[in-house]
């Protein structure tokens, strides 16, 4: 019932059902259980949707502690939880703490997928975006370039996500006062978008505008 209420954006009513469910689960599994973890994560998600980020972090952290006891070496779901916590901290503009969670998620994913994976690329992208928000453009560039390498290994014939990455690499170069390099990456990004999403008017148009602006500068 909680899930239905969340879809209806009735978060307060949904929370009541989730809290009842959590109370029952903890009664049956006082030392922790996968269902306890999932319910705490859902409650954390609902708080996050309400922009109650401190409460959300509290439930995600409690869920994480149980998960780490059940899977001390880390697993896919542990990495996902760490990433979600990083996302919450970014929304709170707590970039240093967010990076810590993103790095933990990345470490687990690199162990699980030593040959690279979409999830590894996502973690690297998160870190690049966070460093960009911090105006640490050289570090942002480093993480975006790492993301690009993973994507190129996974999709040597190209992937639409590579267009976004190339655009962000270009933006890093632009912020570093290197318009020639920035223009080069924006043009590569546009080529991918024209092949993969020719009718997309969002980021594609932003790239076109950037190319026009940088061409004037050049």
Image (spheres, rainbow, N blue to C red):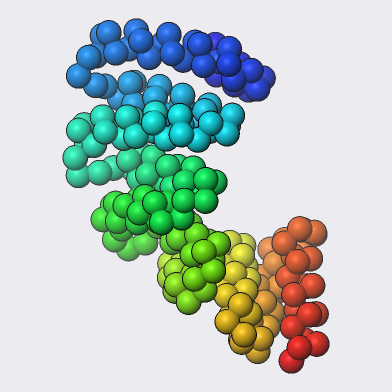
The structure residue drawn at horizontal position 45% and vertical position 72%, both measured from the top left corner, is: 139
Image-based side of 145 in relation to 81, left or right: right
| Residue 140 in the image: above or below residue 90 | below
Residue at x 32%, y 63% (from the top left corner): 115
The one nearer the camera, 77 or 135, is 135
Instruction: Tell me which residue sits at (58%, 12%) in the image.
Output: 13
Residue 141 drawn at (x, y percent): 49, 74
| Vertical side of 186 occupied by 84: above or below | above
Left or right, 188 with reference to 75 = right
**Rendering coords of residue 5 (x, y %):** 61, 16
Image quarter for residue 34? top left
Please state which of residues 8 and 172 is positioned toward the viewer in this rendering.
172
Q: Quadrant of residue 39?
A: top left
Where in the figure is residue 32, as x and y percent of width and height? Answer: 24, 21
Classify 210 as above or below 60: below
Q: How many marks?
A: 0
Query: In the image, 182: left or right of 145?
Result: right
Query: Who is closer to the viewer here, 100 or 205?
Result: 100
Residue 154 visible at all: no
Q: Please report the residue visible at 43 percent of the width from the left and 47 percent of the height from the top.
A: 86
Residue 65 placement, left or right of 199: left
Quarter the N terminus occupies: top right
Image coordinates of residue 213 in percent, x first then y, are 78, 80
Asked if residue 94 shows in the view, the reply is yes
* The C terminus sits in image quarter: bottom right
């Amino acid at each position: 019932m909680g899930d239905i209420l969340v879809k209806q954006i009735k978060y307060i009513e949904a929370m009541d059902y989730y809290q009842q469910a959590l109370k029952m689960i903890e009664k049956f599994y006082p030392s922790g259980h996968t269902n306890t973890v999932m319910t705490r994560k859902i409650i954390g998600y609902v708080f996050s949707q309400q922009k109650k980020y401190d409460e959300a972090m509290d439930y995600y952290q409690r869920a994480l502690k149980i998960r780490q006891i059940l899977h001390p070496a880390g697993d896919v779901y542990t990495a996902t939880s760490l990433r979600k916590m990083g996302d919450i901290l970014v929304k709170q503009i707590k970039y240093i703490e967010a990076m810590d969670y993103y790095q933990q998620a990345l470490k687990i994913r690199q162990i699980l997928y030593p040959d690279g994976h979409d999830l590894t690329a996502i973690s690297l992208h998160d870190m690049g975006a966070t460093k960009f928000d911090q105006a640490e453009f050289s570090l942002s560039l480093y993480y975006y370039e790492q993301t690009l390498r993973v994507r190129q290994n996974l999709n040597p014939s190209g992937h639409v996500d590579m267009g976004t990455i190339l655009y962000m690499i270009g933006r890093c170069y632009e912020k570093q006062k290197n318009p020639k390099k920035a223009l080069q990456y924006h043009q590569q990004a546009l080529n991918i978008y024209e092949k993969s999403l020719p009718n997309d008017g969002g980021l594609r148009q932003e790239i076109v505008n950037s190319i026009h602006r940088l061409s004037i500068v050049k």
